């Protein structure tokens, strides 16, 4: 182990030097010019585009910073949208990671078909066009005489958390009553599809938002009320209530 001795005088001299340096840095920070997004990326046109986050069922509002140069556009920053009534400008770390998801080199952007002759579990796939993938699917359907009730609509990542009209429409058109989402819960897909197919009500993931921020007393009975779950809008309102001194 490396051992070193320092005298009291050396310690005091070092402390004075560090204090002076910290004061200087603080002064520079307060008086330095704030750089805009365009100045961070000179030569690029910068604009903000509203969007929604698809990483969970809350669908928080986003503002995405787009940089454009030479005909190329790239999203380089994600913030919350202050005009979104639910999220109120707040997003979680998962939402902030959207750019990592978008630019992940392992992200699948094209259909994959198992290499002919390879076996399941060997993970041998080749890329294909969408038209080839559609034809391949239809060929297998005809070969094996697959019935509508034998189909499963599996939505990866947020398939069960952010339903889209085309998903329900496609499922109903094909007579397919099985919708699963992974890794989100699998239960509500089939439940919602059956109920909404019968009633015509397709608001599959509505949100009941409690105005915690205006409460003085909050009683939670046998439920965390999504306060400890993935619900930025609720957690934000709950935090505001505690800051105001609400009793829990």
Image (cartoon, rainbow, N blue to C red):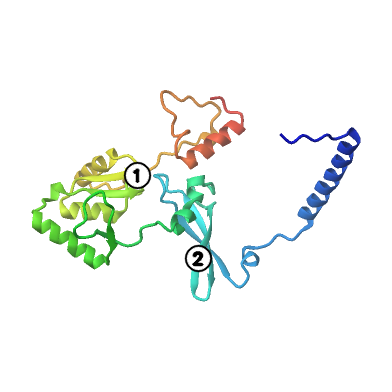
The spot of residue 123 in percent (x, y) is: 28, 53
* Closer-to-camera residue (83/141): 141
Instruction: Identify the residue at image location x=56%, y=28%.
Output: 216
When asked about the image quadrant of residue 222, the answer is: top left
Q: Which residue is mark 2?
A: 74
Instruction: Identify the residue at image location x=49%, y=75%.
Output: 71
* Closer-to-camera residue (51/28): 28
Residue 87 appears in the rendering: no
Would you say 36 lies left or right of 11 here? left
* Closer-to-camera residue (109/84): 109
Q: Which residue is mark 1?
A: 205
The spot of residue 211 in percent (x, y) is: 49, 36
When asked about the image quadrant of residue 114, the answer is: bottom left
Would you say 26 lies left or right of 80 here? right
The spot of residue 6 in percent (x, y) is: 85, 35
Q: Name the secondary structure under disc 2.
A: strand
Judge whether 77 appears above or below 247 on screen: below
Which residue is situated farthest in the front direction here?
Answer: 1
Judge whether 201 appears above or below 214 on screen: below
Look at discs 2 and 1 and give the one toward the viewer: 2
Would you say 210 lies left or right of 1 here? left
How far is disc 2 from disc 1 in space, using C-alphas?
Answer: 30 Å
Which one is earlier in the sequence, the residue at label 2 or at label 1? 2
């Amino acid at each position: 182990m490396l051992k070193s001795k320092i005298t009291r005088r050396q310690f005091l001299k070092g402390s004075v030097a560090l204090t002076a340096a910290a004061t200087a840095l603080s002064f520079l920070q307060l008086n330095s010019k704030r750089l805009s997004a365009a100045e961070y990326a000179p030569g690029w046109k910068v604009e903000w585009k509203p969007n929604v986050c698809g990483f969970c069922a809350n669908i928080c509002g986003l503002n995405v910073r787009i940089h454009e140069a030479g005909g190329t556009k790239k999203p380089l920053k994600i913030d919350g949208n202050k005009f979104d009534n639910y999220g109120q400008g707040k997003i979680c770390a998962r939402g902030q990671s959207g750019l990592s998801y978008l630019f992940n080199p392992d992200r699948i952007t094209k259909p994959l078909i198992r290499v002919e002759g390879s076996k399941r579990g060997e993970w041998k796939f080749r890329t294909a066009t969408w038209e080839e993938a559609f034809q391949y699917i239809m060929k297998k359907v005809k070969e094996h005489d697959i019935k509508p009730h034998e189909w499963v609509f599996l939505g990866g990542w947020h398939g069960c958390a952010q339903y889209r009209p085309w998903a329900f429409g496609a499922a109903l058109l094909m007579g397919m009553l099985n919708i699963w989402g992974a890794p989100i819960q699998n239960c509500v897909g089939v439940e919602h599809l059956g109920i909404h197919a019968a009633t015509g009500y397709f608001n599959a993931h509505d949100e009941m938002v409690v105005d915690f921020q205006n409460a003085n007393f909050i009683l939670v009975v046998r439920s965390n009320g999504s306060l400890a779950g993935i619900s930025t809008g609720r957690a934000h309102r709950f935090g505001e209530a505690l800051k105001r001194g609400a009793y829990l």
